[in-house]
């Protein structure tokens, strides 16, 4: 997408958001009560379109100017929503990536997160009897909300590292520090 297209997209998002918030984008005055643009269903639809366009804009900018650092704001952290129950690092990363401003930050990956958690000693590696290396928990990880659970994939049993609610909270609260440990 060309720079002028990105600018047009940015302008379109602002116009749609103004209309959705009851403001005439041409003169800045409130849209009259009773006007169809004041209907809640229309407002929700416009806000959805604006959010979709924002995500598209971020993805486009991310692909063309990939940031090489991970940055998450307090506001973004506040908008992260996790599914109930235990989750793995890949699911954690997906939840975080949904709220990140990809024009400023690189995406979070489960692989990178696992690497960083091993570096600070919250997770460890073990060699399986068949010679493979697996990530697992240690005594330190248990106190931070990380545990393993027996899983089955293609008739092969393995222990998956998961985080409970305590682990999710710890990781989200300390994400910038954990991801800031370059290496």
Image: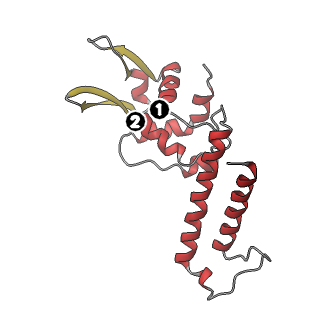
Q: Is residue 177 left or right of residue 156?
A: right
Residue at 61% x, 34% y is 176
Which residue is at the far right?
27
Q: Where 70 falls versus 96 (above or below)?
A: above
Where disc 1 sits, the SS reads: helix
Q: Is residue 137 visible?
A: no
Task: Tell me the tag on residue 88.
Answer: 2
Residue 78 locus on image (x, y percent)? 57, 50
Residue 83, relative to residue 39: is it above or below? Answer: above
Q: Residue at x 49, y 25 (%)?
A: 117
- The answer to which quarter of the image holds residue 124 is top left
Q: How many marks?
A: 2
Q: Position of residue 59 (x, y in %)?
A: 60, 46
- Pick the front one: 73 or 13: 13
Residue at the outermost front position: 2
> On the rendered structure, is 88 left or right of 20?
left
Q: Identify the residue at the far bottom of this view.
A: 34
- Kind of element beneath mark 2: loop
Residue nearest the viewer, comparing 94 with 160: 94
Mark drawn on residue 33:
none
Coloration mode: secondary structure
Quarter of the image where the C terminus is located: top right
Give above or below for 17 relative to 164.
below
Q: Which residue is mark 1?
A: 110
Residue in front for this viewpoint, 137 or 12: 12
What residue is drawn where x is 54% and y is 36%? 108
Residue 134 x, y percent position in the rendering: 36, 19
Find out whether the residues at labels 2 and 1 contact each other: C-beta distance under 8 Å: yes
Which residue is painted at 61% across and 30% down in the image? Answer: 177
Labels 2, 1: front one: 1
Q: Position of residue 60 (x, y in %)?
A: 63, 46
């Amino acid at each position: 997408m060309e720079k002028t297209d990105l600018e047009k997209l940015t302008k379109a998002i602002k116009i749609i958001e103004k209309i959705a918030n009851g403001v005439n984008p041409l003169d800045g005055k409130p849209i009259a009560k009773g006007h169809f643009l004041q209907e809640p269903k229309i407002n929700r639809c416009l806000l959805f379109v604006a959010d979709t366009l924002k995500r598209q804009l971020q993805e486009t900018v991310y692909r063309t100017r990939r940031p090489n650092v991970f940055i998450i704001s307090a506001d973004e952290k506040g908008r992260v929503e996790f599914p109930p129950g235990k989750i793995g690092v890949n699911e954690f990363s997906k939840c975080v990536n949904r709220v990140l401003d990809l024009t400023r930050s690189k995406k979070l990956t489960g692989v990178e997160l696992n690497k960083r958690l091993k570096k600070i000693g919250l997770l460890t590696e073990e060699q399986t009897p068949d010679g493979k290396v697996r990530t697992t928990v240690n005594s330190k990880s248990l106190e931070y909300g990380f545990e393993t659970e027996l899983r089955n994939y293609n008739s092969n049993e393995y222990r998956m590292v998961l985080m409970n609610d305590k682990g999710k909270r710890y990781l989200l609260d300390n994400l910038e520090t954990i991801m800031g440990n370059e290496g």
